[in-house]
Image (spheres, helix red, strand yellow):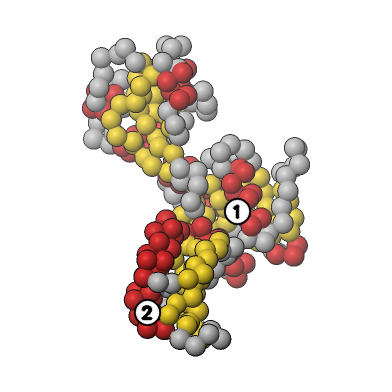
Amino acid sequence: MIKVALPNKGQLFEPTVELLTSCGYKLSKAPKSLSSLDPENNVEFYFLRPGDIPLYVASGVLDAGITGKDFAAEKGQVAEPLLDLNYGYSKLCAAVLVDSPYGTLAEVAKLRIATSFPAITRRFFADQPVEVAELEGAVEISVRLGIADAVVDVVETGSTLEQAGLRIVGEPLFRSNAGFFAQPGHEDHDDVRVMRSRLEGRLVAYEYRMVEYDCPADLVAIATKITPGIESPTITALQKEGWLSVKAMVKANRANQIMDELSRVGCKGILLTTIESARI
């Protein structure tokens, strides 16, 4: 049985549980529970602080885990990254008081910086020594309280920084999203490989849709150029002579335009359906 770490709270918790549930895993978290057993899928899930997960996985205590790439980078990415996941997007940005005179990251580097990500901050400003105050949370209030002159903090919408009277300076120091990580050497473990395959299948399902339509036989060459599918479209004869049924996977972000194009060339009965999971 493999042991897999999951975020116990924060923006990563609910999407991670939803993703794994949609992949056929059974897990639940009671208010004070630290683990959840899924014997049918040979997995025991552990709910841990997102920032601790990379070390638990890298140290060999756990086989795999899902957490933010920023947390893995902060720990030196000692866990093996296996898969990018399509949620938990955020940026690590520097910020100063709205009315402060500082406008560049070079200027920020000369200030006292409060952050929960000291390693990433020092790596970004590697060309010069920086004074860093390491905090566990509520970083945005540190300037007002006199602990620091600037912060480096996680930004999703920027509203938290604005409420604290701060403004972002320069480019993000780091861009993050959720990731699936494994203990080094365990990426080929059967159950880890199965989990990765299921997660990949679900990500494909988010990215693609299935389009089906009836097509005149003399137009099938034109229509299938619009919907080439992954390897090739599925084509079967209809009972009505001279007509074919075509089925193909298409990119979700172009699905409606593709339906418009098929209609214009003379296809009928065009249907678009979601995909629950896939292996391609």
In the depicted view, which residue is nearer to us: 95 or 57? 95
Disc 2 on helix, strand or loop?
A: helix
Q: Which residue is mark 1?
A: 19
The answer to the question of whether label 1 and label 2 lie on touching residues, with beta carbons closer than 8 A, is: no
- Please determine whether, in this image, residue 237 is positioned above or below residue 105: below
Whole-angstrom CA distance, mark 1 to mark 2, is 40 Å
In the depicted view, which residue is nearer to us: 193 or 136? 193
Residue 40 in view of the camera: yes
Q: Quadrant of residue 126?
A: top left
Q: Residue 125: horizontal and vertical position, in percent?
A: 29, 34
Disc 2 marks a residue whose amino acid type is Leu
Q: Residue 201: horizontal and vertical position, in percent?
A: 54, 65
Task: Give the left or right position of residue 196, taking residue 125 as reference.
Answer: right
Q: Which residue is mark 2?
A: 219
CA neighbours of label 1 inside 10 A, class few (<14), some (14 to 19), many (20+): some
Quadrant of image for the N terminus: bottom right
